[in-house]
């Protein structure tokens, strides 16, 4: 009888530990990325004139399809193949609209700029981001650039 009690106690403790680790992972990702779909201040106005870009792709891990929102600032006229292209990946807490002033500055310096929201940010698929999903989203944005602007320097 004591042996079964010890086995049951071990199973309960293992379940609690697994549940605690899963909860800690989700909270840690929320604390690190601080995903938001809000624009701060008047940054949405600063993004006016930038082209909305939608990047649809299927994640490698067999999850549901992902839709990323981005802003493209490449200029009105076709740009020279010598124009460098910059993929701008924003940090935690802000979305691409919050990056509009930085995008404008990079554009003034001569770059065509694509900025994307990771999953969980802005208008992109609402899902809690992770390091792996952020890297996958960045790769999808890079591949979008390669398909849509193949002659430009990267």
Image (cartoon, rainbow, N blue to C red):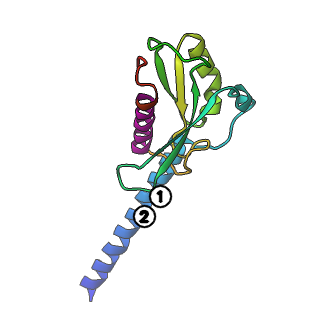
Q: Which residue is mark 2?
A: 19
Q: Secondary structure at mark 1?
A: helix
Residue 23, x across and y down, in percent: 47, 58
Residue 21 highlighted magenta (yes or no)? no
State the separation of the CA atoms marked 2 and 1: 6 Å
Q: Quick check: can you spot residue 137?
A: yes
Proximity of marks 2 and 1: CB atoms separated by less than 8 Å = yes
> Magenta part of the protein: which range?
131-146
Residue lying at 40% horizontally and 41% vertically, measured from the top left: 136
Residue lying at 45% horizontally and 29% vertically, measured from the top left: 145
Q: For residue 16, which quarter of the picture? A: bottom left
Q: Which residue is mark 1?
A: 23
Out of 57 and 43, give the one closest to the viewer. Answer: 57
Q: For residue 152, which quarter of the picture? A: top left
Q: Around disc 1, counting alpha carbons within 10 Å, would you say few (fewer than 14), some (14 to 19), or many (20 or more)?
A: few
Instruction: Say which quadrant the N terminus sits in.
Output: bottom left
> Magenta segment, principal secondary structure?
helix
């Amino acid at each position: 009888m004591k042996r079964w009690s010890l086995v049951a106690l071990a199973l309960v403790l293992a379940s609690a530990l697994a549940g605690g680790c899963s909860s800690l992972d989700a909270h840690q990702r929320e604390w690190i990325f601080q995903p938001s779909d809000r624009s701060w201040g008047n940054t949405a106005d600063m993004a006016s004139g930038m082209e909305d870009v939608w990047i649809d792709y299927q994640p490698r891990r067999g999850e549901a399809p992902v839709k990323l929102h981005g802003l493209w600032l490449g200029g009105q006229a076709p740009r020279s193949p010598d124009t460098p292209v910059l993929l701008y990946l924003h940090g935690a807490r802000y979305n691409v609209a919050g990056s509009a002033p930085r995008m404008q500055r990079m554009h003034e310096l001569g770059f065509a700029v694509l900025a994307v929201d990771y999953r969980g940010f802005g208008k992109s698929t609402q899902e809690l981001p992770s390091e792996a999903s952020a890297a996958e989203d960045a790769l999808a944005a890079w591949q979008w650039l390669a398909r849509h602007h193949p002659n430009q320097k990267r």
